[in-house]
Image (cartoon, rainbow, N blue to C red):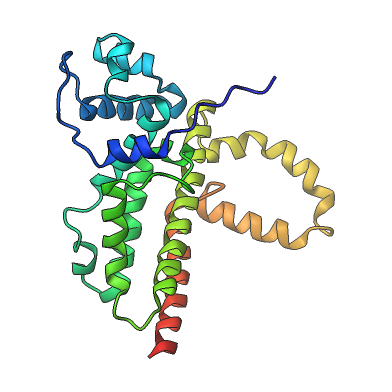
Amino acid sequence: MSPKKAAAPDPARSLALLWGSHTKAGRSGLTVRSIVGTAIELADANGLEAVSMRMVAEQLKVGTMSLYTHVPGKGELTDLMFDSVHGEMYAAVDEPARQPGGWRGALEFVAERNWEVLMKHPWIHEVPTIRTALGPNVTLKYEAELRPLDGLGLTDVEMDSALTLVLTHVGGTARASAEQLRTQRESGLSDQEWWLEISPALTQVMAGMAERFPLAGRVGTAAGEHFQATLDPGHALKFGLDRILDGISLLIAERD
């Protein structure tokens, strides 16, 4: 049997919670903010699967039913968690646009802030984002990140697409970095230590493959020796971001 899927959040209830008060306390003294904060701590420590209404209630030392008077279920709680962590990104809506270096410096700043949040809260990768209810923090984030692109001659669709390209690159690289860190933690070996461990077997297998895969052998060896790892997230992030921003620069030049 396939594992039982968590109930999907009710969009209307999520939106009402996202845009409502998070500080009003109930009879138990609980607030939406305290519930969401505790859930985020659990997810940061053990992943999104570790978050349940029962576990959050245990951490808060209250009965599980007390939570349901504030949040209907895990689906809506996840929407609240997702919106909350994105409220950490910018001190003001115009912060990205105020960065030195024009639009390019602003998007580098945007990439850096998104990277920091994804690395601090890797469970974000587990949250479906295609139909996520839009909360105030996610909406402010979108507004803040679009402002540096406004007035450059790009169409609205091009502005959205350029931002999406940057954020997709950051998200993909952060996901790979999180997987690398998790693998190292679970195995107890760094990438370099792992390669040294399998090197004898790999050398034996690849001995007869040099003629068949000359580029794979040459380039893979060069990259591995340079980074001393299967992946250097910092390099991948900067290299890809620079190429993306070069492409956006060409598009802006065409519009000029």
Question: Is residue 232 among what the camera can see?
Answer: no
> What quarter of the picture does the C terminus occupy?
bottom left
Name which quarter of the figure residue 154 lies in.
bottom left
Identify the residue shown where x is 39% and y is 44%.
133
Q: Position of residue 172 (x, y in %)?
A: 50, 51
Name which quarter of the figure residue 103 lies in.
bottom left
Query: Does residue 224 appear to the left or right of 202 in the view shown?
Result: left
Q: Is residue 186 above or below residue 83?
A: above
> What quarter of the picture does the N terminus occupy?
top right
Q: Is residue 96 above or below residue 174?
A: below
Query: Does residue 35 appear to the left or right of 161 in the view shown?
Result: left
Q: How many marks?
A: 0
Identify the residue shown where x is 28% and y is 71%.
148
Identify the residue shown where x is 85% and y is 50%.
208
Residue 236 or residue 11, whichever sits in front:
11
Q: Position of residue 91 (x, y in %)?
A: 17, 53
Identify the residue shown where x is 30% and y is 53%.
139
Residue lying at the far bottom in this picture: please name it: 256
Question: Is residue 162 among what the camera can see?
Answer: yes
Residue 71 or residue 94, whichever sits in front:
71
Q: Position of residue 106 (x, y in %)?
A: 28, 67
